[in-house]
Image (cartoon, coloured by chain):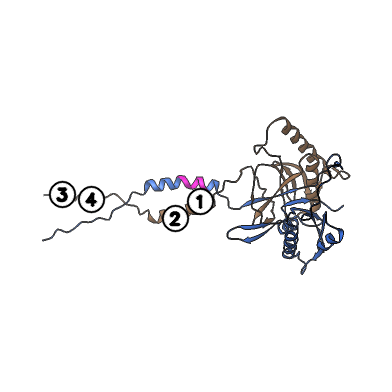
């Protein structure tokens, strides 16, 4: 008589998920702590080093004007090139202290704003100003003066929280 | 003979919890801020149309001054304007020279605090940097003049000159 085949004991395989759960819990706690409801309108440039500050006011909607070491941008669009802290390839009205393409663009923004409701905050529209910390004040001042002349005299300097 | 007790360890079904975690992690990852950004309110001086009516002369405010903070290559230069007599205003002013080639922000903060304690209704500082001064220095000077952190852990602050006006020296 032939040998009967042995019954194979099929047992459900149990994965030990405890260590994975531990890892997930740690990740979850970390992510909950770094959760931010910050305004997503903020676009940071990669070649921009913002200054550090103790300021604690949260970012709110505003028109983004960025001055990086190489470019001047409005809402992500390049308006002028910057080289060694000076604007190149654009007309600058030295008497009135304004960067002409920036002035015309912001003037257009102001016109649109007066016709349509574009500001979701319902307060006065301001400029969210991001400038590289190593730029000389002369460059920063020129952008600020141009904006003020176009109808935006108030700014929010975007800084890294210390 | 006593029966051999076959007590298997109780296994909790962790799969639904795992599913929940897996759904939450990508969502939280999207909303996570790995750097904190904040803002400083500032303005540039604006010209107003027409002069003030001489008939309604404003009341003299002796507890209020406007602080002028000049940022020069050699250090900070403070001066003040207000309704006080000129000799009193002159006493507020002064210079804070650089310390070992670096701007002395601590001394500036101390000085601003002293001035604010005396003229506690003041809130405006006019910042006047020279053209070669770095933007980073301007922001740090604004910090020193704006507030004093009393407790970093509890984030309690004493507000000084909160209204910053940035202009340039002509």
Subunit of label 4: A
Query: Residue drawn 61% across and 61% down?
Result: B152
Which label's residue is closer to the chain start, 3 or 1?
A: 3
Report the front residue among B142 and B24.
B142
Q: Is residue A108 rendered magenta in the image?
A: no
Tag 2 residue: A23
The chain assigned the colour blue in the figure is: B
SS of the residue at dot 4?
A: loop
Tag 4 residue: A9
The answer to whether residue B131 is seen in the rendering is no
Which label's residue is closer to the chain start, 4 or 3?
A: 3
Query: Residue drawn 65% across and 39% down?
Result: A121
Q: Quadrant of residue B57?
A: top right
Same-chain check, marks 3 and 1: yes
Same-chain check, marks 1 and 2: yes
Subunit of label 1: A
* Mark 3–mark 2 distance (CA, rounded to whole Å): 48 Å
The image quadrant where one finds the N terminus of chain B is bottom left
Which label's residue is closer to the chain start, 4 or 2?
A: 4
Report the front residue among B169 and B102.
B169
């Amino acid at each position: 008589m032939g040998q009967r085949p042995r019954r194979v004991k099929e047992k459900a395989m149990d994965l030990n998920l405890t260590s994975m759960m531990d890892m997930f819990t740690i990740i979850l706690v970390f992510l909950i702590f770094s959760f931010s409801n910050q305004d997503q309108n903020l676009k940071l440039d990669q070649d921009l080093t913002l200054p550090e500050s103790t300021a604690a006011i949260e970012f709110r909607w505003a028109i983004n004007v960025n001055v990086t070491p190489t470019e001047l941008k409005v809402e992500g669009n390049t308006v002028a090139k910057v080289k060694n802290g000076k604007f190149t390839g654009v007309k600058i009205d030295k008497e009135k202290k304004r960067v002409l393409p920036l002035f015309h663009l912001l003037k257009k923004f102001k016109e649109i704003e007066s016709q349509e409701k574009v500001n979701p905050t319902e307060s006065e529209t301001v400029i969210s100003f991001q400038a590289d910390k190593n730029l000389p004040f002369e460059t920063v001042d020129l952008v600020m003066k141009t904006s003020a002349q176009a109808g935006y005299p108030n700014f929010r300097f975007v800084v890294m929280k210390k | 003979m006593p029966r051999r007790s076959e007590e298997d360890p109780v296994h909790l079904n962790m799969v639904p919890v795992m599913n929940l975690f897996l759904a939450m992690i990508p969502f939280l990852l999207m909303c996570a801020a790995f750097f904190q950004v904040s803002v400083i309110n500032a303005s540039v001086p604006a010209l107003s149309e027409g002069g003030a009516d001489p008939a309604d002369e404003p009341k003299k405010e002796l507890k209020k001054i406007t602080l002028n903070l000049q940022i020069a290559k050699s250090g900070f230069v403070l001066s003040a304007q207000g309704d006080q007599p000129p000799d009193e205003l002159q006493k507020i002013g002064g210079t804070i020279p650089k310390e070992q080639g670096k701007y002395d922000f601590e001394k500036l903060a101390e000085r601003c605090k002293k001035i604010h304690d005396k003229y506690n209704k003041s809130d405006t500082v006019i910042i006047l940097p020279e053209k070669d001064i770095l933007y980073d220095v301007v922001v740090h000077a604004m910090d020193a003049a704006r507030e004093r952190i009393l407790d970093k852990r509890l984030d309690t602050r004493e507000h000084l000159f909160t209204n910053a006006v940035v202009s340039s020296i002509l």
